[in-house]
Image (cartoon, rainbow, N blue to C red):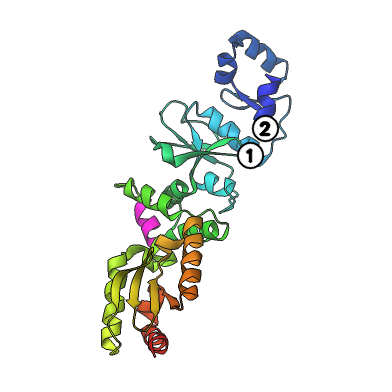
Amino acid sequence: MLDLAARQYGVVATWQLVQHDVPSVQITRWAHRGWLVRLHRGVYAVGHRSLTPDGHHLAAVLACGPGAVLSHRSAASAWGLRPTSRPRIDVTTPRAAGRRQPRIDAHQSSLHPDDRTILRGIPITTVARTALDLGEVASQRDVHRFLVAAEQQRRYDQRAIDAVVARAAGRRGLRPLLGALRDLRPEHVATRSEMEMRALELITAHGLPAPRVNDALGRHLIDLHWPDRRVAVELDSRRFHLTADAFERDRRRDAELAAAGYRAARITWLQLTREPAWVARTLARLLA
């Protein structure tokens, strides 16, 4: 028991002790003697009540049984992305059993395996799934702040967010999450073809030479290519260029184009839609 508690911030659950062949009568005896201090129904601190926040989080998860995970506001706090002073702890459980626990807000849901992970030994929803769940219990503004914090702390994964959104049909948290995403990055809702269309419309409207679109240059595919002017422009959406791999790939591409004598530039969705005149002037200088 002591080894198990040492790995779990000093807390154990009855169902875990039973799995380790500890008789129920022995558990009751230890509780009467004060060796086990009750935290929740079926969950005890071993010999004390002085727990860290992680200990309280794990105790609540254990109280909801196997398969439960920390979620919603409590998960956001555990990830360090949205502090909370709520005394109640949010837990998502696949079953209704154990849901009515004091000091625990239990949410019943069957989580996709990709929406679950482990943080400091605590079963918890991923950052992407937490963003969706947060939209069910907090405002769109709170979700936006959560996503901004995730990006600042390099915990933001656009592919994971997209996967959560694709699985979220009918969920209350979907609308606030999509609204927060639009506020955070309007280009999230723009496809590559939409960016190309906007760029070509701008080029035509300002009388600039027509580029080749999605043109192969060596091993690279250039979004807008003027081979006679040796100019290459990337339509740079964070949706497709935010990962570490994409960051390294983009820098290698820029270096290789520069070494080949190309003038390379990057244009974002916000620049296309909010600063079209500046984009046109920049392109004109590059093409001159």
Which label is found at residue 54? 1
Residue annotated with mark 2: 9
In the rendered structure, which amino acid carries the disc numbered 1? Asp
Taking the image as shown, residue 25 lies to the left or right of residue 157, namely right
Q: Nearer the viewer, residue 284 or 127?
A: 284
Q: Is residue 121 above or below residue 261?
A: above
Magenta segment, prevailing SS (helix, strand or loop): helix
Q: Nearer the viewer, residue 90 or 1?
A: 1
Which residue is painted at 35% across and 78% down in the image? Answer: 273
Query: Where in the figure is residue 46, as x and y percent of width and height?
Result: 70, 24
Q: Is residue 132 above or below residue 217?
A: above
Q: Secondary structure at mark 1?
A: helix
Given contact means CB atoms under 8 Å apart, are the residues at marks 2 and 1 in contact? yes
Q: Is residue 2 above or below residue 263?
A: above
Which residue is painted at 34% across and 76% down in the image? Answer: 225
Sequence-wise, the earlier of marks 2 and 1 is 2
Query: Where in the figure is residue 197, as x and y percent of width and height?
Result: 26, 74
The stretch in magenta equals 174-179
Query: Where in the figure is residue 250, as x and y percent of width and height?
Result: 47, 65
Q: Secondary structure at mark 2?
A: loop
Taking the image as shown, residue 256 lies to the left or right of residue 212, namely right
Which quadrant of the figure has residue 211?
bottom left
